[in-house]
Amino acid sequence: MKKISNEVKLGAIALVTIIVFIWLYNFLKGKNLLSNKAHYYAVYNQINGLAGSSPVEINGYKVGVVQSINFLKDGSGRLLVKMSVGKGFTLPEKTVAEVTTATLIAGMKIRLVFGSGPGIYKNGDTIPGRLAESIITKFENELVPLKEKVTGMINVLDTVLTGINDIMNPEFRKNIRNSMANLNHTTKNIDEVLGSKEAELKSMIADLSKFSKMLSDNSNKLGNTINNLQTISDTLAAANIYATILKLKATLEKTSELMDGMNKGKGTAGQLFTNDSLYKNMNNSISNLDLLLKDLKANPNRYVHFSLFGKKN
């Protein structure tokens, strides 16, 4: 058996080392030369920092990596991205390779959004690519209207502050200080009054508490009283007080007319009250009667004739 020389052994070792190095280098870049992968292409106008070895995912599950990124040779500036996907994953037609953020901090990835088919893409096909709206872009789009509102609010606030500065002149500030001093003095006086009347206030509050307790204890009696008042009011309502008042009014009106007629000398009673001739006649009659009685007393024989034997004097 021929002995292998040291040069041959050294050459074999060097060849194996180079092969292992190449495999390890490609493995670290995401290229596994021993694995069975399908390759797909996608064209983008912008990739937002997508790099080689970036993950390729389906529904959040890593199914491959980005193999390479190159400019198209048509001079358009568009980018051709080559990605490797395990052959166990078939991509229906109309599937889109969407470039999106890998994490909230940094990094990009390709997310394969399945299409509706009906066919499937084959190894080496170019699938549609698009750029997803990043979180920063969304934030910027939402921040622009907010920025405009904040700017408008700042302008309004600046106008308000300018108006306040115009109002807050030295005289106005002096008036405010005087008002605060007066208010402080008034508050002090109120405190003094309350302090001096504290015992009376406590007594008043205690009396109110007793009164409320008395009302609470006699609520049944108060209810009965209210019911009695309601009964009396119902009775008065049933007695037709209104009709009675109307009759009394008519009577008073007639009495007023009668008194007015009497004052004017109408009728017998009116003549009696207003004409003094009856008074004079009565006075004369009484005077004559008085004279008659006096004469009758002084000279009874003129008026009474009495004889035992019937002899006339």
Image (tube, rainbow, N blue to C red):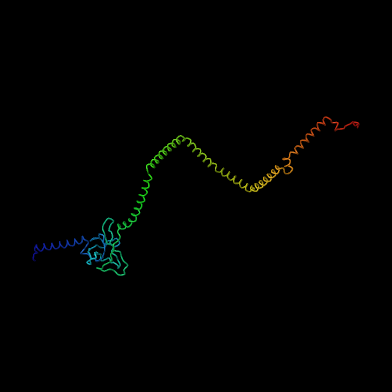
Quadrant of the image containing the C terminus = top right
Please state the horizontal and vertical placement of residue 133, each as a whole percent of the image.
30, 60
Occupied quadrant, residue 23 = bottom left
| Residue 265 shown left or right of residue 73 in the figure | right
Please state the horizontal and vertical placement of residue 309, each as a whole percent of the image.
91, 31
Above or below, 131 against 269 in this view is below
| Residue 3 shown left or right of residue 84 in the figure | left
The residue lying toward the viewer, choosing from 172 and 308, is: 172
The residue lying toward the viewer, choosing from 293 and 249, is: 293
Please state the horizontal and vertical placement of residue 98, each as a whole percent of the image.
29, 63
| Residue 167 shown left or right of residue 241 in the figure | left
Please state the horizontal and vertical placement of residue 196, each as a whole percent of the image.
46, 34
Quadrant of the image containing the N terminus = bottom left
Above or below, 97 against 158 in this view is below
Above or below, 143 against 271 in this view is below
* Residue at the limit of the structure toward the bottom, as seen here: 119
Occupied quadrant, residue 60 = bottom left
* Tally of numbered discs: 0
